[in-house]
Amino acid sequence: MSSVTLRHALATSTPGALASRARHAVGSGWRQLASLDRPERSRRSALAELGVLALLGLGIVALAAWLAHPLSLPAHPQRFLIVLVTQLVLYGAAAVWVWWRRVPTRGALAIIVLVAVAARLAFAMQAPTASDDIYRYVWDGRIQAAGINPYRYVPDDPALAAYRDEAIFPHINRRAVPTIYPPAAQGVFRLVYALHPDSVPWTRLTFVGFDLVTILALSGLLLRLGLRPERVILYAWHPLLILELGHSGHVDVVAICFLVLALRARLGARPWQAGFLLACAALTKFYAIIALPALLDPRRRRDLRLPLACVVTIGLAYLPFLGVGGKVFGYLGGYVQEEGIASGDRYYLLGLARGLWSRLPAARAGRASPMRRNCTAACWWRRWARSPFGAGPARCLRRAPSRRARSSSSASSSPAPRRPTPGTRCCSCRSSPSSGRACSSPRWRSSAPQASSTSSGGGPAQVAGRAHSPTGSAQWRWR
């Protein structure tokens, strides 16, 4: 690197230069959002559309504040369900309003972000009752702050007796097993503990900050893809997301944030950064690694920069915890078995499909004879192929075979040729098979007079003849 390039890099890396670049990016993005508004819309109409959106958002926030009441969730499950369904109705109405009316983009984004943050903060001071995972987050941060590997001891281990208290430890679930959370999640827990030790509300606030970054990143991603950025309301105002983040405080929102940033980096042709962010998402929640095939470029199959960055990042993240050996993955294996992930019992739709399938005759036929199973399967196949849902797939499955398959099947199924019988003559040279004359294309026909007959349509019927090859074999042809 030359001295001029080094000086330029240092000059552009100062806090003032970075702040100037950030202001320029925000200003240009704001002007780009203004260009998406309809110029023929009057100011009164725009304010009315934004007012309707704001009223729907206030309804969602008010219902979230009611759910945040300490007695509402555990003591009144029916009321909780009614309020949650009402929130879903308001959420659907707001999404349809934004999609249909095309409200002003800048005002809509401001309302969407404010309502999303307010609805999440409504649960900030409430003790979690639907899930107690957040207490394990605080515990892991406390153990790391003490300089102890979180995968080495379980919370019930006597070696950690000095770190137990009455606020966090009694609420930890699975105290007899090690932690399951990967290194990136452990880093977030350590960061939260450094900001405010032993605090459940501060843990929630940190996750709300990650979720705010996700909302802004999704808005920019939609704008980059040529879509209206206010469609981010589908994510930001979803009542289940608000409840799982604001009330339960799950770390999944951190993985979602890293995953969205990885997608932005992938669209920006930055494979190293995309691989690093994808690894951070997988190191927060393991399931995020399934997004790797979607982020690969199919036009550059030999470009290994993204998967290489992902693998290197995962290896380096686990490096500080390798002192515990095979225990570095924590309770992952036991969790997969305990929660029914390996068997599929955890997934409601899969269990429902299994229950329906067990009641079908096709499933009961599995205990019958092979002939009965085949007949039952054939009957169900015919019913499915005749239905509107199965006609297309069945037609694809019954496609004609390839040319090679057709030629081989026709060759194998053609009848064996037969030699001409006495009393036949060639149609070309009028010779008999016994004359020994060679003909280039002999076609043998019976020399006996054929009885003329009529077909059902009244015309003369065709006379059957034989085509004879030079080797002496023959087969019937219609003449």
Image (cartoon, grey):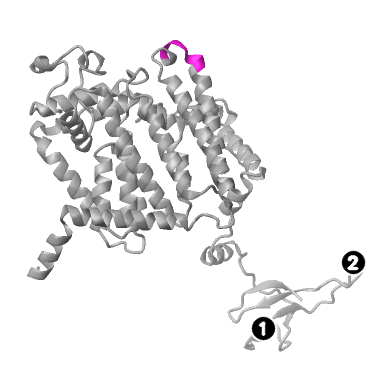
179 or 412: nearer the eye? 179
Residue under the image location 51 percent in, 49 percent down: 104
Q: Position of residue 464 (x, y in %)?
A: 77, 72
Marks 2 and 1: in contact by CB < 8 Å? no
Q: Quadrant of residue 342?
A: top left
Sequence order check, earlier mark of 1 and 2: 1
424 or 174: nearer the eye? 174
Q: Amino acid at mark 1?
A: Pro
Residue under the image location 16 percent in, 41 percent down: 317
Secondary structure under the numbered disc 2 in the rendered image: loop
440 or 280: nearer the eye? 280
Q: CA distance from mark 1 to mark 2?
A: 32 Å
Tell me, for residue 457, which label it has, or none: 2
Residue 5 relative to residue 52: left or right: left
Q: Decide whether residue 18 is among the magenta residues.
A: no
378 or 278: nearer the eye? 278
Q: Quadrant of residue 158?
A: top left
Give the quadrant of the C terminus. bottom right
Q: Position of residue 150 (x, y in %)?
A: 14, 28
Mark 2 Cα within 10 Å, few/some/many (few <14, many 20+)? few
Q: Which residue is mark 1?
A: 442
Q: Position of residue 420 (x, y in %)?
A: 68, 74
Q: Amino acid at mark 2?
A: Gly
Asked if residue 448 is positioned above or below residue 386 in the image, the reply reads below
Residue under the image location 27 percent in, 58 percent down: 270
Q: Provide the residue span drawn in magenta.
A: 74-79
Residue 85 relative to residue 114: left or right: right
